[in-house]
Image (cartoon, rainbow, N blue to C red):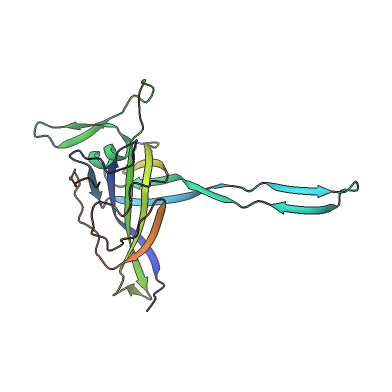
Amino acid sequence: MAECLVIKGLCTMRATRLDPVTGGVDGGPDNYSITESQISMALTADIEAGTESNQKNGCGVIQASDAGEDIFKRWSPIALSMAKFEPAFIEILTGAEVAVDGGGEPVGVIGANELATGFTRPLAALECWTKLFDGDAQSGTRPWGYILLVASQWRLGDMNFAEEFTPVLLSGKSRTNASWSNGPYGDTGFDDVVETWAIAMLENDPPDATCGYATVAATS
C-alpha cells in the first residue's frame, strides 16, 4: 500500500569523495565521512526560464504569445550549516588540505590555493537522511527520508567568530553524474540508478556517524 508521509528534520549526512573527471567513487583510502552535526541544508532550484515571445499589432495589442518550457539545471546554491567543525567531512566536500596530529587524526583544514595553476575543484556525492512522520509519530514502515545528490561541488561560506557558538557554513551546487549508478554502499534499500538527484522514503536506518574518515571500495 502506498504511503504519503511528512518530512521532518535532517538527521545524518554522508559525503563520498568522487573522481573529479569520471565521477566514479574515488578508489583511495579515507574516501567518505558521515556526520550527524548538520543544522540545516537549503536547496535552491536553478531554473533556466523559457524564452517568451509575443507578437503585437501596431496598436500594442498582443496577437500571439508563447512561453518556452522552463528547464531545471541544478540545485544552486546549496546552503549547508553544521554545528560542529569536522575536518574530514569539510575536506571531502571542499578539497581543503586536512591537518593531522601526531597520531594521524584529522584536527584541522588548510585552505587550497584556488588561484594556482591546475587547481581542480573536488567532486563529492552527498546523501542525507531525514525523519518521515505519519500523523504525530515517525512512520513505522518507512521511517526515513533520503535525499541524494549524485555529485556536488562546495566551498566554505562566511564565518563569524563572536560570543555565540559559531556554525560552519558551506555553499555548494549539484551536477549530474552518470557514474554514481546506485552508489557503493548497498545500505539504503534504494537501488534505483540515479544520474541527477533523488528524494525517497526508506525502511533502512541511516548509517552511524564516523566523525573522521572511513573507506569504501570503489565501484567499477
Given residues 82 and 207, the one toward you in this image is 207
Q: Give the quadrant of the N terminus.
A: bottom left
Give coordinates of residue 216: x percent, y percent: 19, 47
Residue drawn at (47%, 47%), measured in percent from left and top?
74
Q: Count the numbered circles shown.
A: 0
Residue closest to the eye, 8 or 206: 206
Where residue 186 sits, quadrant-wise, is: bottom left
Q: State whether residue 170 appears in this view.
A: no
| Coordinates of residue 175 in the picture (x, y in percent) | 42, 44
Q: Residue at x 65, y 51 (%)?
A: 68
Any part of residue 154 in sight: yes
Residue 79 lies, with reference to residue 186, above or below; the image says: above
Considering depth in this image, is 174 or 193 the residue closer to the camera? 193
Q: Residue furthest front?
A: 220
When asked about the image quadrant of residue 88, the answer is top left
Q: Is residue 65 left or right of residue 193?
A: right
Residue at the right extreme, as displayed: 59
Does 86 sit above or below residue 199? above
Outermost residue on the bottom side: it is: 1
Residue 86, given in percent of the width and then of the height, sits at 24, 42
Instruction: Say which quarter of the image contains residue 218.
Output: top left
**Residue farthest toward the left in the current orientation of the protein:** 103
